[in-house]
């Protein structure tokens, strides 16, 4: 019996992008491109006849822009959408609006060399589409999980230096460091958590799977909305109460200790668990640097990045939390962590902020 494929509609005004994206997606045996439209009006006519599982949607198109179409779609006929846009500062701000409007994920296309870039990024593109297909949207039945081909992938050992003999994390101190990992559906879930925190919340480091440039726009948006300071992490940034550091896209972020103080190291390096930044890299570095002074939180996301790292944090004495299935947009990363026994507590999204504050108060 053949497994059900993810049926995709591509909406982009560029014929070459439609052609290349179709070829890239159909290289995956779990994906079927059922149509391609040059603008939202053509897409709407297609959807009226055949409803896809996922739509890839360009931002800049004639007759109606992608954001306007997305908002109409979410109010009239919610379908998981992956936005496709150029890698620009202006574009990153626009895509923040798309994520707010209900887009599940973001993929990039450069202004030149689009075909080559899409071919190089085919693993990321196919994963984004598959993750979107599993997303929980209102008025939409969640599809059954499909199997996927698992290719070889690097672990966080590729980024972590060998542990020094006799080196260990500090014993319990007065400061708690919160490390959070999220992927598909994480942008709005993180906003909900961070908006619920007061200005003196424990220091937080976050890995959210996002492309470069978009993490800076994401951090600025959250900084405007939250009582805590939110910024894109820079190498050497201190982890302080009232501050949230977000790992830059396309760079790994590690937690390090100098004496009794914590800071982040931002480094290039290979993809880990198919991601850069990787949640596993952050979590496993936190296990080594902070031990029982850390709290690990794994949230909504596709795949298994962070599951091993959360387990290592738990083994090092950290307190660990996973988001529950009912409130996860995609119950992939938390599910894998729970299956490993890495999560000490499983909580709905609405209770995660209170748990962070409770654990921070215990250490104060």
Image (cartoon, rainbow, N blue to C red):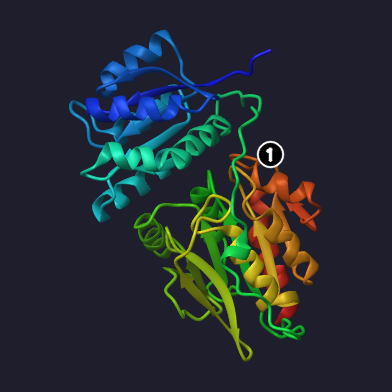
Is 45 left, or right, of 32 in this rendering? left
Q: Is residue 154 above or below residue 328?
A: below
Number of numbered discs: 1
Say which of 355 and 238 sits in front. 238
Is 298 left, or right, of 188 in this rendering? right
Q: Could you say where residue 104 lies in the image, as x and y percent from the top left?
A: 47, 39
Q: Could you say where residue 10 lies in the image, as x and y percent from the top left?
A: 36, 25
Q: Is residue 338 above or below residue 140?
A: below
Residue ID for mark 1: 326
For this orientation, the residue located farthest to the bottom is 259
Q: Is residue 74 visible?
A: no
Is 113 left, or right, of 249 in this rendering? left
Say which of 201 and 329 sits in front. 329
Quarter-wise, where is residue 33 in the image? top left
Q: Is residue 115 above or below residue 333?
A: above
Q: Which residue occupies 58% across, 79% down?
A: 256
Q: Is residue 250 visible?
A: yes
Q: Which residue occupies 64% across, 15% down?
A: 2
Quarter-wise, where is residue 63 in the image? top left
Q: Which residue occupies 46% across, 15% down?
A: 51
For this orientation, the residue located farthest to the front is 152
SS at mark 1 in the image: loop
Say which of 72 and 299 sits in front. 299
Q: Could you say where residue 11 lies in the image, as x and y percent from the top left?
A: 32, 26
Within-10-Å neighbours for mark 1: few <14, some 14–19, many 20+: few
Is 256 left, or right, of 8 in this rendering? right
Q: Could you say where residue 53 lies in the image, as x and y percent from the top left?
A: 50, 22
Q: Quadrant of the C terminus?
A: bottom right
Q: Quadrant of the N terminus?
A: top right
For this orientation, the residue located farthest to the top is 49
Q: Is residue 77 above or below residue 259?
A: above
């Amino acid at each position: 019996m053949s497994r059900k494929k993810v049926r995709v509609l591509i909406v982009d005004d560029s014929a070459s992008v439609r052609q290349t994206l179709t070829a890239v997606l159909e290289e995956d045996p779990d994906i079927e491109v059922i149509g391609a439209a040059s603008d939202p009006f053509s897409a709407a006519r297609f959807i009226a006849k055949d409803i896809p599982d996922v739509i890839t949607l360009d931002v800049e198109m004639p007759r109606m822009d992608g954001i306007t179409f997305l908002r109409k779609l979410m109010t009239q006929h919610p379908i998981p959408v992956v936005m496709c846009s150029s890698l620009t500062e202006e574009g990153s701000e626009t895509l923040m609006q798309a994520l707010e409007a209900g887009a599940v994920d973001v993929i990039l296309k450069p202004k030149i060399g689009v075909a080559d870039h899409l071919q190089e990024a085919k693993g990321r593109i196919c994963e984004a589409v598959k993750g979107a297909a599993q997303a929980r949207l209102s008025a939409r039945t969640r599809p059954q999980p499909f199997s996927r081909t698992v290719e070889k992938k690097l672990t966080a050992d590729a980024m972590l230096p060998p542990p020094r003999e006799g080196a260990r994390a500090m014993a319990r101190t007065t400061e708690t460091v919160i490390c959070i990992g999220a992927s598909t559906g994480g942008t709005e879930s993180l906003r909900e958590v961070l908006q619920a925190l007061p200005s003196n919340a424990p220091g937080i480091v976050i890995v959210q799977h996002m492309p470069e440039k978009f993490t800076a726009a994401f951090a600025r948006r959250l900084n405007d909305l939250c009582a805590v300071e939110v910024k894109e992490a820079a190498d050497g940034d201190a982890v302080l109460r009232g501050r949230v550091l977000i790992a830059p896209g396309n760079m790994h972020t590690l937690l390090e200790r100098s004496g009794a103080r914590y800071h982040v190291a931002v480094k290039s390096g290979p993809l880990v668990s198919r991601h850069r930044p990787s949640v596993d890299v952050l979590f496993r570095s936190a296990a080594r640097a902070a031990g029982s002074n850390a709290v690990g939180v794994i949230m909504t996301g596709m795949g298994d990045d962070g599951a091993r790292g959360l387990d290592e944090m738990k083994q090092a004495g950290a307190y660990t939390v996973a988001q529950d299935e009912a409130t996860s947009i995609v119950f992939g990363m938390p599910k894998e962590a729970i299956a490993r026994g890495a999560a000490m507590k499983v909580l709905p999204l609405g209770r995660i902020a209170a748990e962070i504050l409770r654990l921070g108060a215990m250490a104060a």
